Image (spheres, rainbow, N blue to C red):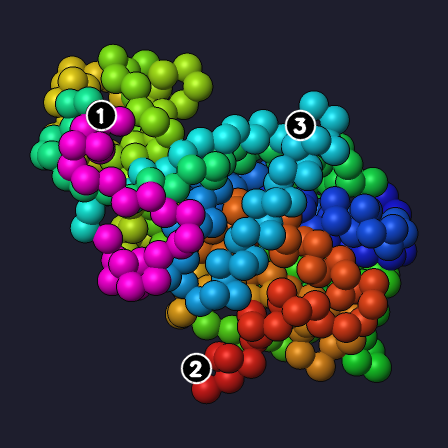
Amino acid sequence: MERRPDVLVVGGGILGVATAVSCQEAGLGSVLLIESTRLGVGATGGAAGLLIPEAHHGNDPAPFVELGRSSFDRWKHLETSCPGGVGLVGLDWLGLAPHPDGFLADPSPAVEWLDADQVAMLVPGLAPSISGALIRGQGRLNPLRALARLAPGVEQVASGVTATTVEVRGGRIASVVTSAGTFSPGAVVFATGGPPALDGLDLSVPADLVKGHLIVTEPAPVRLPGTVAPVATQLEDGRLLAGGTLDFGDQTPVVRGDVTDAILAELRAALPATEGLRVTHGWCCFRPRHPDGLPIIDRVPAVDNAWITSGHFRTGILMAPSTGWALAQWISTGERPVEAAPWTIARFANS
């Protein structure tokens, strides 16, 4: 491994890999990515992989929606530029009523409002009969497949390497001590999901982890027009992906049968034709979250050559390409990109 890389990325989830790829694409010199366990082992490997930026319009701040839109465009770019593609699949999103107040008050221009009869034509057998909002031209991918396609674009990737300590001299990170020895990088990006906790790094940011469950069924006797929220997403082979629960207060790393049973029961209630359908996979993951549910994309305070991206919660897969590109541009120019401006550490100064 290069002991003096121009850029060291700490964290091998989708945010870390996308950032390392962006740094390579931006011509920032040698790039080394390290991950303490396996690539994609955290929230990335447990995510559904939905890319639905327009559904955030009205629900989240406008800069967040714009970041999602630009990131979706970058996923499209990666699909054509990455050897073999990243597995991007186009789909439509159908959100069933009731809708959040913000979405109703300020819907995306892409929304088509459907009455109950129109929804029934798209989703035969849906119970009960209900209206909905249709957004076309969104996307989905398998996060681990995308990660596997992107990682070869990084000059050096080392899994099983844990960062433990940083040495700061003269307002710069001079060295990063790891289980594989010491590195002296030109720039460092911490993409560790939650805020990094390393000796020598003076960084205090409020964050927690929110557990969630997902299930996949055997191929279903129904055909959905993409994603039907909050019911399910149909995969290419006919299986149904359902769930995405928010299990607040549960920090146990086990898949709970009562939660997966409840997901299946809700699926069967909404689509009676799925009665008797068998669950083939059930899993859980922990999503890193800041108190406002929005990410950090910022320079580490009082350190000139270190950046952090964390707390992407339920949108890390969607936001990864634009987040990585913004960080690469910041490292390259020394100037904060416009798309990173709202996502500062300073907003938690009084937390």
Q: Residue at x 54, y 51 (%)?
A: 69
Q: Earlier in the sequence, mark 1 or mark 3?
A: 3
Residue placed under numbered mark 1 in the picture: 121
Q: Is residue 91 left or right of residue 69?
A: left
Q: Secondary structure at mark 2?
A: loop
How far from the left and from the top, in percent, is residue 112?
33, 43
Q: Quadrant of the C terminus?
A: bottom left
What is the distance, in whole Å, between disc 1 and disc 3 at their CAs? Answer: 33 Å
Asked if the residue at tag 3 contacts the one at tag 1, i.e. Cβ–Cβ closer than 8 Å, the answer is no
Answer few, some or many: residues within 10 Å of disc 2's Cα (few below 14, many 20 plus, some between 14 and 19).
few
- Tell which circle, 1 or 2, labels the residue nearer the N-terminal end: 1
Per the image, the residue denoted by label 3 is 85
Which residue was labeled with disc 2?
Answer: 351
Amino acid bearing label 1: Met
Magenta segment:
99-123
Q: Amino acid at mark 3?
A: Gly
